[in-house]
Amino acid sequence: MTHQAGRALTIWLLAMLAGAIVVWNSHFSADMSFFLPAKPTAEQQVLVDQLKEGVVSRLLMVAIEGGDAGQRAAASRALRSRLEQLPAFVSVQNGETASMNADRDFLFAHRYLLSPAVRPQRFTVDGLRAAVADSIDLLASPAGMMLKPLLPRDPTGELMAMVSGLNAGAQPNARGGVWASRDGERAMLLIQTAALGSDTDGQERAIALIRSQFAEAAPGATLSLQLSGPGLFAVKLRETIKQEVTRLSAISALAIVAVLFFVYRSPRLMTLGLLPVASGALAGIVAVSLVYGTVFGITVGFGSALIGEAVDYSIYYFVQSGRLGVEQWRARFWPTIRLGVLTSICGFAALLFSGFPGLAQLGLYSLSGVLTAALVTRFILPPLAGSNVNLRDLSHFAPALKRGIVAMQTLRWPVLVLAVAAAALLTLNRDQVWHPNLSALSTVSAEDGAIDQALRADISAPDARYMAVITAADRESALQAAERAGQKLDALIAEGVIGGYDSPARFLPSQAMQASRRASLPASAELQARLQAALADSPLAASKLAGFVADVEQARSQGSVDRAALNGTALALAVDSLLIERPNGWSVLLPLRPPGGDKGVDIAIAPVRAALAGSGALFIDMKNEFDTLYNDYLDEATLLSLAGFLAIVGLLAVTLRSARRLGIVLLPLLLAVLLVVAGLHLAGEQLHLLHLIGMLLIVAVGSNYVLFFDQSGGAAALDDATLVSMAVANLTTAIGFGTLALSNVPVLHAVGATVGPGAVLALLLAAVFVGRQARAGVSRGTGA
Amino acid sequence: MIKRLLGYLLLIAVALPASAAFDIGQLMGDLARHKGGKAKFVEKKYFAILDKPVVSTGEMTYTAPDRLEKRTLTPKVETLLLDKDILSIERDKQKLSINLANQPEALAFVDSIRGTLSGNRAALEKNYALHLAGNADKWVLTLLPSDQKIASLVQRITVSGSKNQVRVIEYLQADGDRSVLNIDPVDAK
């Protein structure tokens, strides 16, 4: 080993050590932030916040099955009383009414500060007469039955005025005093975790707690527990990614080691050959960790493909330099390999500009990995391997390969016909080729999705699709803004545009609003006099309303309702979930309910936007935001793929300096993309944005093989060693990407299913087309 | 007046075994054959706290065995629909749906009227002790709740009628308030 080589080796060792330290300290994440936009719009920010910490993201739905209704109800009560003690849960609801009494008592106690009907007019003689007459009408109705005992203290019906705005439309079914599914065969609970939706560890612990507490509350095998919710999906996603990273990397590594061993028949060469791969994988994680702070699990999962791609360089080196020696190899083959590395880098670099953080990471990871692997092959591998490569003679594979090439070259026209057919197929079915929304990237299995839907329907869990969002500097101005927006929304309810809405100001009105309501209340003597006048002809005598007069007087003198007053009620939870303190101010969420009935489950967006215009409230349709987000990603991915493709074309144009050669190199690549896409479509896969990225990678990775044909002056002119090295390198790349196709994570699967076959096709098509053309052309060396 | 009524009821109860010619089974059979129809109603509710009864009027439509619609027209329009176990109330453009399976007490309450209209003796006897007086042309069926929870809401329900037509339903609530529902069939079949 020369002095220079020793120095290169030392630098490499130090770099690897530093890299290992960075990786050791890296933060790995397997949550959905992989998919969330890096630079969200105001609307998307709401979406991101809701997904990460919104109430809906913290809801877990639980069903208890088996046994009889009595056993299920008993288990539901037992589970609730156990979970309620635990700090991991903010709320555990199972339909038991005891918990609702506290809420009703709170509303009743503070009705003159909370009721939206409290205004000065309501306490005039006419106002009192009308309000009491309404209350008496209501008594005659079954709806008024529960109000009867309250009438002497609440003759103006403030409790009804408060309650009527709440969503009483959808209530879960009940059996034995607790919630049940629609068919009554399962007891249902709705649980809100203290852990945020984005805290996957916290969600995992909460889910484990629910399961263990249930096992203790309902021992034996009579009853079973079913659970779903965003938290479970997050935990499962992480589990899936963890398993897949290990599984895919192991499969890919084992298969490639097997191929290398079969080719090299030498443990030493095999180990050396894996050196650039290991360096590349390490460098990829280090780069991502340093640039983004967090490494996504899916990114690491992409390592399987990187292994297949990065091992190519050492294969070229060992197989090609065996006969020629290092110097000759560097002169003759390195420029071609270098060009291949550069095209790959162009492809991966395009992803760096993506606003889809997962994609940007995949780009950086692959780029650094490939670059490192190539550099290690070029500078570290030769001194380590020494001149004594001693690779066994592989030329006996060559004749078979050459016969294959000759046979394939007769297929030029059939391949072109096939390509035309593929293009026609895709053009005809262009409306079905693409998956329309973000669910394409969802890792939730169909089975889990079905369970989730069933539980959600059974418990009428909120899906929080529509909301108006307000931001303000402090709590008071946030609540005042919520009240102003509420007035606009009340008008929309009257018009039937929306069915209703929730607002934190319902239970925690702004101090200004409470003061104005308090100012509406007359003093005792005045109220007495007005009641006498108002109720002169009423069946309800004013003399029976002493409790009312006393309660009004108390409301006049007592303090305002603040957040602390809500403690101990479920209303506190409702307020906290709708009124959120953020580092830079306060946010108010006003979830809107669709009108329901024959008007359907959708809200007409335009009238709501128009009504809220100028109020400072932003109206958001979550589903629409998801679709927009996905379409933004897709548009961006299209643009980036094109840019990457153009960069590769530009690079090739500059290097090849011949339009004809450029065309010959690009033809097999484009045909490979076309055939793979048509194949995926025929196989029933709906394409999404990762398939698109896959197409770019076919060009970026596939070009390596085509370039060898081009630079060597055609397939027939390739020397035996180069031909064998290309076959082996192509095989390992196909294994690496192909393994990803086994993944259950759509992001990885799509890239694998596209690039795996694409890389092989690129090589085969290069043999078909480049060889023939080049035979007629001038055989040239590599001046680059 | 209430005392007199109670005394009268007691008399009926004592006299019950004697009127073997017309028994509960027979009445239920008659009622079960009634397949429904439309009627006008006048309902008077007497509340201790109010000096005068609250009177409401409207129409009722019954479709055997488990659909009952009560449309109140005065003093305020309100629609009450009982369809199987779902009770929906529509008032002032607001709609409220209650699943009675969730509320056993309310269900027992509703079963008293539904069980009578459909002649479902088993449903009635689940929650009430039944007493019958009179004959087929003029009968009085008294329902006394057997369950403590229901008794804390309603003391007694008295249904009276002629042949298979229910004419009057009176609820006496636990607190002494009561309501009297007079039913006048529009197209008696």
Image (spheres, coloured by chain):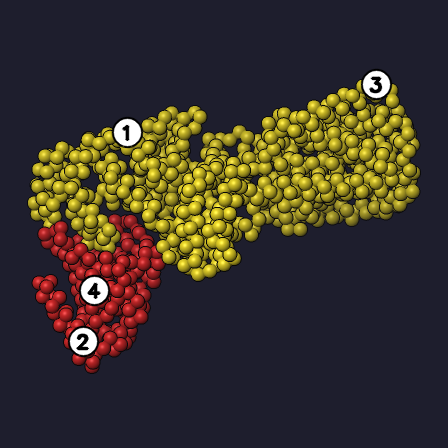
Chain colours: A yellow, B red
Q: Nearer the viewer, mark 3 or mark 4?
A: 4
Residue at point 59%, 34% (across, down): A29
Residue A425 as seen in the image, left or right of residue A501: right
* Label 3, label 1: how far apart the Cα atoms are: 77 Å
Q: Are marks 3 and 1 on the same chain?
A: yes
Residue A433 as seen in the image, left or right of residue A568: right
Q: Amino acid at mark 3?
A: Gln
Label 1 with label 2: CB-CB less than 8 Å? no
Label 3 with label 1: CB-CB less than 8 Å? no
Depth check: give the residue in front, A23 or A321: A23
Identify the disc placed on residue B157. Answer: 4
Residue at point 12%, 48% (across, down): A540
Q: Amino acid at mark 2?
A: Leu
Residue B102 at least partly seen: yes
**Residue identifier under label 2:** B16
Residue A84 as seen in the image, left or right of residue B66: right
**Residue identifier under label 3:** A4
Q: Are marks 3 and 2 on the same chain?
A: no
Residue B63 at least partly seen: no
Determine whether A5 is above or below A192 in the image: above
Q: Position of residue A738 (x, y in %)?
A: 72, 43
Depth check: give the residue in front, A34 or B13: B13
The chain holding disc 3 is A
* Label 3, label 2: how far apart the Cα atoms are: 119 Å
Judged from the image, the secondary structure of the residue bearing numbered disc 1 is helix
Judged from the image, the secondary structure of the residue bearing numbered disc 4 is strand
- Occupied quadrant, residue A110: top left
Judged from the image, the secondary structure of the residue bearing numbered disc 2 is helix
Judged from the image, the secondary structure of the residue bearing numbered disc 3 is helix
